[in-house]
Image (cartoon, helix red, strand yellow):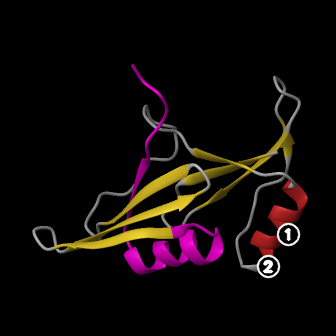
């Protein structure tokens, strides 16, 4: 049976810009970077703790449907110990976060921000 989530795949329109965002701004470490000659694109495997992302650079991919929200994967959520410090760190790197809200079910604070292609990312304390 299932034992966990192995990875999440993200398609980026600008590979270098998204690699910079996930590695240099968010702090993911590079596990492997491979050029896919049959597609003319890159596949980057990155990790942060137990979270692994496959980042595919596909400049001709169609734009993500955002509003109204479409069926499918809604967002990625990252755990943080100190939401305020994380928001301040991202802000210093030029990343804007939405106002902090409180989850009515868990009573925990959270916020959203977006990757270079507009993929919603959540921080949850």
Q: Nearer the viewer, residue 39 or 71?
A: 39
Residue depicted at x 88% and y 64%: 85
* Relative image position of residue 15 (x, y in whole percent): 38, 74
Mark 2 touching mark 1, by CB under 8 A?
yes
- Disc 1 target residue: 88
Eyeballing the image, is 121 above or below 97? above
**Left or right side of 19 for 49:** right
Badge 1 marks a residue whose secondary structure is helix
**Left or right side of 19 for 101:** right
Q: Nearer the viewer, residue 59 or 77?
A: 77
**Quarter of the view holding residue 106:** top right
Residue depicted at x 43% and y 42%: 6
Q: Check the picture and name the quadrant holding the N terminus.
A: top left
* Relative image position of residue 74 (x, y in whole percent): 53, 39
* Relative image position of residue 123 (x, y in whole percent): 73, 50
* Relative image position of residue 50 (x, y in whole percent): 58, 49
- Disc 2 target residue: 92
The range drawn in magenta is 1-29
Eyeballing the image, is 63 above or below 95? above
Q: Residue furthest top?
A: 1
């Amino acid at each position: 049976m299932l034992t966990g989530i192995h990875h999440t795949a993200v398609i980026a329109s600008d590979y270098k810009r998204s690699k910079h965002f996930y590695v240099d701004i968010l702090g993911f470490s590079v596990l492997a970077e491979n050029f896919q000659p049959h597609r003319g694109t890159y596949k980057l495997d990155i990790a942060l703790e137990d979270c692994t992302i496959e980042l595919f650079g596909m400049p001709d991919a169609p734009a993500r449907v955002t509003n109204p929200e479409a069926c499918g994967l809604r967002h990625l959520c990252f755990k943080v110990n100190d939401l305020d410090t994380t928001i301040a760190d991202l802000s210093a790197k030029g990343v804007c976060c939405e106002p902090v809200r409180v989850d009515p079910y868990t009573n925990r604070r959270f916020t959203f921000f977006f990757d270079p292609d507009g993929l919603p990312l959540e921080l949850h304390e």
